[in-house]
Amino acid sequence: MVRITGIIGEDCKLINVMEQVSNERGDTVRCIIDSPGGIAEEGLAIYDYLKGLNRKVVTVAQNQCGSIASVIFMAGEERIANCDIFIHNPFLGDVHAPYLTQDDLQDAVDYLEELKKKINDIYAKTSGVDKTGLQRLMDEETSITPQQAVSLGIATRTGNFVTENKYTPVAKSSNRIVIKALNKIKNQKTMKKMTLAQRIKNLLAGTAKNLDFTDVNGNVVSVEVPADRESQMPEVGDPASPDGSFELENGMVITVADGVVTEVVSEQAQSLDELKAENEHLKALLTEAQAKLEEYEAMEEEVSKSLNLKRDFNGGKGGKTAFQKALEERKKNPKPLNGKE
């Protein structure tokens, strides 16, 4: 019996579930879920793990099953509701992350929107209920009775005893992960600002030069190169914008990712690659021709041997056999039939 109890991500983590499953024998894994929810990402990881098992999974909602715990409940091929199933949209809870800009908060909103759609997809795919209706239930933070859960397809049946608990979901959904993500975004933005400030300083000091290159489609890619570089052509590692791949009129292809040149392929390099490919093709043709030549030479040798034998038997080309020579000699010096002179 696998028990998923307490706060998901704190009292129960993916590793705890994996350990319990490894001790289960037989083709069926039975999971008792008694949890108000917890960290959304941890719950989704547990859901994915249970769905990936090559065994029948039975989930049983016991006492309480809300928030991300209700998503774990959906992993069961057989889903038994012994209590209310509480569903709602993911939220941050008590976030203490100072110095966040409006953009940072928008990133958090986008993240939660993506998470909401993922959870809605799981409910809809398992139950067969329309996504729009499910989203309405999530928006209204709905407590679904066991009987209603069966009617909606969220549960496959109710158990022998049913409890209907009303509770408030824990304020921990996505907190830790989102705050970490927001801090990472903030650090990335800080680094970009510092890099931009340094680039401006380099340009003003004359140690760097900004060059514009126009590709075959008329797009302009701006590349910052050291002022003392002899070639004055872009190289890997040079700051550049915008991101993308740009083919220039001279055949050069410049690839920019995250504001940096990641690849430069010149027409000469492309031609060299083509020559190498052609060289390999010619080598293959030469090998094939040599094999054919050896085959023809062997055939010629056999034919020559056959012709030589024939010539020896017939007296050779333009020659005379011993029998022909004897006849000619006889004509020159005829002898009597009795053999006497």
Image: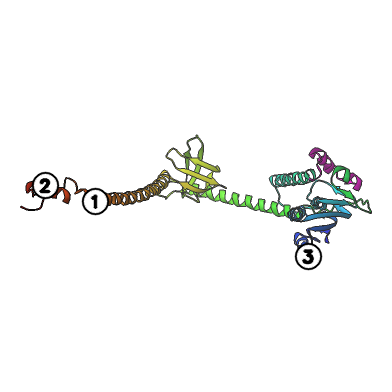
Of the image marks 1 and 2, the number of the one nearer the N terminus: 1
Residue 43 placement: quadrant: bottom right
Across and down, in percent, residue 307 comes to: 25, 49
Across and down, in percent, residue 157 comes to: 88, 49
Of the image marks 2 and 3, the number of the one nearer the N terminus: 3
User: Residue 21 in magenta?
Assistant: no
Q: Label 2 crowding class (10 Å Cα cut-off): few <14, some 14-19, many 20+?
A: few
Tag 3: amino acid: Asn
Name the foreground residue: 53 vs 167. Answer: 53
Q: Secondary structure at mark 2?
A: helix
Residue 38 seen in render: no
Q: Residue at x 55, y 43 (%)?
A: 243
Q: Secondary structure at mark 3?
A: loop
Q: Which residue is mark 2?
A: 328
Q: How many marks?
A: 3
Q: Label 3 crowding class (10 Å Cα cut-off): few <14, some 14-19, many 20+?
A: few
Across and down, in percent, residue 205 comes to: 48, 49
Q: Secondary structure at mark 1?
A: helix
State whether residue 250 is above or below residue 35. Answer: above
Name the foreground residue: 193 vs 3. Answer: 3
Q: Which residue is mark 1?
A: 308
Question: Which residues lie in the magenta part?
Answer: 126-149
Q: Is residue 151 left or right of residue 205?
A: right
